[in-house]
Amino acid sequence: MQKRIGAGEIMIQIIFSWIIGSILGSFITCWCDRSIRGQSILFGRSHCDTCGQVIGKRDLIPVVSFIRLKGRCRACGAPIGKACLINEIFTALFFAYFAYRWGWHLWSVRLAGLLLILLAISTIDLSEKIIPDALIAAGILWWILTTWLLRLSFLKGLMGGMALGALVWLTALIVDHVLNRESLGGGDIKLFFMTGLYLTINFAFFHLLLSACIGLFIYGLWHRKNDHHEDEMAFGPAISMSTMICICIEPFIVRLFSLFI
Ligand SMILES: [Zn+2]
């Protein structure tokens, strides 16, 4: 998939991808934060939530600014939320990995786009407990466009999406019947369908299993941290994380299966 290039060139691609990733991660977090508050991303400048001071350009550099300011507002010293920093580092790490693994190929662009959509979904789901349909639609459109550009099989992806969506929907129906309450939101089922398109049928079951494991792990942490028992938990981040893990360890799993078959 990747033509032979020198080690220096690979290094440059990795570093640039890290920088682009941290900037886009920061942008997505800011966009989610503003859309949750009903503010526009185009108008209005970033400001401190505590004192309202507009944040200057020198304090808007992803990761670097946070470290330099020791995670505090320059004007009032109030702590800055770590969510943005975590998202910036996460995105930068994945972008760098895509560049290392596949180089600057259209395949990496496809994965980078998916990562940003999943980041937005996770951020909004964590705070609002909702997965916006518009983001699911964006994920599906991005899949159609990149599948066409990369000349991949539409059928394989569709089978993955349909199988996963149907399986999760059926499981949710049974669990709802047993527990007598809603276990999975409609947004989660749509998200499984959307991620199934990218992972194809090969990874559908593994993805479902891994999402459930990550979900249970997050649920456990959540309950230990919060004394009040909140029934509703955001499952979007677990599904998103599982998707990215499946994509990154795909070569490893394919090799593992080839040992047995
Ligand atoms: Zn401040």
Image (cartoon, rainbow, N blue to C red):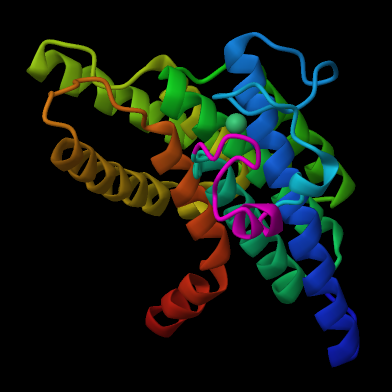
Q: Quadrant of the C terminus?
A: bottom left
In the image, the segment drawn in magenta is 63-78
Q: Quadrant of the N terminus?
A: bottom right
| Residue 26 visible in the current orientation | yes
Q: Residue furthest bottom?
A: 7
Report whether 156 appears left or right of 150.
left
- Provide residue 178's location: percent of width, then percent of height: 8, 19
In which quarter of the view is residue 121 placed?
Answer: top right
Please tell me which residue is depicted at 13% across the width and 24% down the height of the picture: 229
- Provide residue 41's location: percent of width, then percent of height: 78, 21
Dominant secondary structure of the magenta stretch? loop
Say which of 243 and 50 sits in front.
50
Please tell me which residue is depicted at 83% across the width and 37% down the height of the picture: 145
Please tell me which residue is depicted at 84% across the width and 66% down the height of the picture: 16
In which quarter of the view is residue 73 placed?
Answer: top right
- Residue 67 part of the magenta-drawn span: yes
Please tell me which residue is depicted at 16% across the width and 11% down the height of the picture: 181
In which quarter of the view is residue 14 placed?
Answer: bottom right
Report whether 246 appears left or right of 34.
left
Say which of 14 and 56 sits in front.
56
Say which of 259 and 65 sits in front.
65
Say which of 66 and 228 sits in front.
66
- Provide residue 210's location: percent of width, then percent of height: 34, 52
| Residue 153 visible in the current orientation | no
Report whether 8 appears left or right of 88.
right
Report whether 179 appears left or right of 73.
left
Quick check: 130 above or below 197? above
How many numbered discs sit on the rendered protein? 0
- Provide residue 2's location: percent of width, then percent of height: 84, 76
Ligand 1 resides in the quarter of the picture at top right
- Residue 74 part of the magenta-drawn span: yes
